[in-house]
């Protein structure tokens, strides 16, 4: 099962919005075939593994981290896996966790049992669910998986004196951040970050894996028309989430004319656009992975409201040494892994109170970061 999950993780960034799935077929203690779901719309892990078998899988044991699918609904891209397993005559299927997709959930297992195949569910279940936490977030809870990311200095600062932008993380960290953007479906910032840094929020220099939606939480519609985000709205979607109120419509016009989508959401705490509504809106647009490039205010508020599933902190050895420089948010979460970024250190933490927290296991993302840094 561990091997199946290791293989599954290789699909990260290419399979979404599908889950990451790996499959290992074993006969008399020997692996006779393995495979994983490589790309959205392409073969599932089970079919890959069956196709790779070097001898007959008849009577063999199949290990797969997610329940094999059995549905044939409209829009489904590939033939279901259960009939393939039945036809191959496998003896036993060991499943990490059930597929939360309501079209499968339990039915895949039932169909296997009905065909006379022995099934065991729940081997390394927590880790199997954690691997696909983002898929669970979207399918079960109708929201994206929220990763909060920031860089902090050795003295816990995220910028220079009075919040003036300061480069804290190193080159390697910047490459990792851009690659994470390339694997995310959307990136969200607060208006404070736009006003202070004027970021463009693209995945510069990285292979474009999917369109990246760029979102701004901007209750009072303060985003400048000359900001890079507004200027590049024609090249990739920009959504400005403002607080619903009357009398602000006129200012929307120039933004809309420049291709920005303005979405008014009901106010949450402190008069800001309610973040849960923003998350629901993003999920409706198919966003599975949301990266929040958090300034200290937005970052702390998401943590305090329990809306951060995962935190990535880049810890730099640099000392800012300015008393009035803004402090990094405080995330009282469990550290699950870290990678040395040639001087800086990337620390991954998971929110144990998240409804998609299942195990203290490092993510598939940390694995590609480790590979990226070595190469
Ligand atoms: C599996 N094995 O490797 C994956 C599964 O459109 P399709 O045909 O790719 O089907 C997508 C659904 O299949 C997806 O929503 C999830 O329920 C399941 N994913 N199932 O048996 C796999 N990737
Ligand atoms: Zn399948």
Image (cartoon, rainbow, N blue to C red):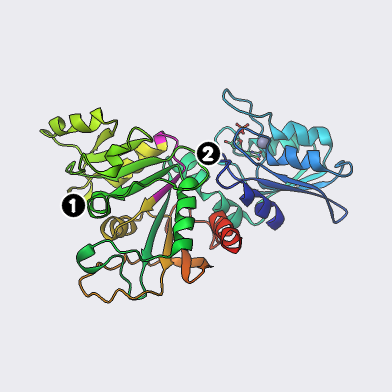
The residue tagged 2 is: 17
- Mark 1 residue crowding within 10 angstroms, few (<14) / some (14–19) / many (20+): few
What is the quadrant of the N terminus in the image? bottom right
Q: Which circle, 2 or 1, is nearer the viewer?
A: 2
Q: Is residue 190 above or below residue 347?
A: above
- Mark 2 residue crowding within 10 angstroms, few (<14) / some (14–19) / many (20+): some
Q: Can residue 115 be seen? A: no
What is the quadrant of the C terminus in the image? bottom right
Point out the residue furthest to the top here. Answer: 74
Image location (x, y in percent) of residue 97? 62, 48
Label located before the other in sequence (2 or 1): 2
Image location (x, y in percent) of residue 93? 75, 45
The residue tagged 1 is: 270
Residue at 42% from the left image edge and 64% from the top image edge: 313
Nearest to the observer: residue 108 or residue 256: 256
Image location (x, y in percent) of residue 233? 32, 35
Image location (x, y in percent) of residue 333? 42, 65
Residues rendered magenta in the picture: 284-291
Point out the residue furthest to the left here. Answer: 247
- As helix, strand or loop, the secondary structure at mark 2 comes to loop
Residue at 46% from the left image edge and 69% from the top image edge: 344
**Ligand 2 falls in which quarter?**
top right
Q: Is residue 285 magenta?
A: yes
């Amino acid at each position: 099962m561990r091997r199946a999950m290791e293989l599954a993780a290789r699909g990260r960034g290419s399979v979404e919005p599908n889950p990451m799935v790996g499959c290992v077929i074993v006969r008399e203690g020997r692996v006779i075939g393995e495979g994983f779901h490589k790309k959205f719309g392409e073969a599932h892990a089970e079919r890959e593994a069956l196709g790779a078998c070097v001898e007959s899988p008849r009577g063999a044991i199949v290990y797969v981290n997610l329940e094999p699918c059995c549905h044939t609904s409209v829009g489904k891209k590939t033939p279901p896996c259960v009939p393939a397993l039945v036809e191959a005559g496998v003896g036993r299927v060991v499943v990490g966790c059930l597929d939360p997709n309501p079209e499968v959930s339990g039915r895949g297992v039932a169909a296997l049992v009905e065909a006379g195949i022995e099934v065991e569910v729940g081997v390394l279940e927590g880790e199997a669910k954690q691997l696909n936490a983002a898929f669970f977030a979207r399918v079960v809870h109708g929201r994206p998986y929220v990763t909060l990311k920031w860089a902090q200095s050795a003295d816990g600062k995220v910028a220079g004196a009075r919040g003036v932008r300061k480069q804290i993380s190193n080159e390697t960290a910047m490459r990792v951040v851009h690659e994470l953007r390339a694997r995310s479906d959307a990136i969200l910032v607060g208006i404070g970050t736009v006003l202070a840094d004027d970021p463009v929020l693209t995945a510069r220099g990285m292979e474009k894996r999917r369109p990246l939606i760029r979102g701004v939480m901007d209750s009072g519609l303060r985003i400048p028309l000359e900001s890079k985000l507004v200027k590049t709205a024609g090249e990739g979607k920009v959504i400005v989430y403002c607080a619903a109120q009357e009398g602000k419509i006129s200012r929307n016009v120039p933004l809309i004319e420049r291709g920005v989508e303005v979405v008014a959401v009901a106010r949450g705490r402190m008069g800001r656009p309610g973040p849960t509504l923003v998350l629901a809106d993003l999920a409706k647009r198919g966003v599975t992975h949301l990266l929040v490039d958090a300034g200290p205010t937005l970052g702390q508020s998401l943590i305090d409201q329990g809306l951060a599933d995962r935190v990535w902190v880049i810890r730099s050895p640099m000392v800012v040494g300015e008393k009035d420089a803004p402090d990094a948010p405080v995330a009282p979460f469990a550290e699950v892994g870290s990678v040395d970024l040639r001087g800086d250190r990337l620390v991954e933490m998971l929110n144990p109170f998240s409804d998609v927290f299942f195990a203290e296991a490092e993510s598939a993302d940390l694995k590609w970061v480790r590979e990226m840094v070595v190469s």
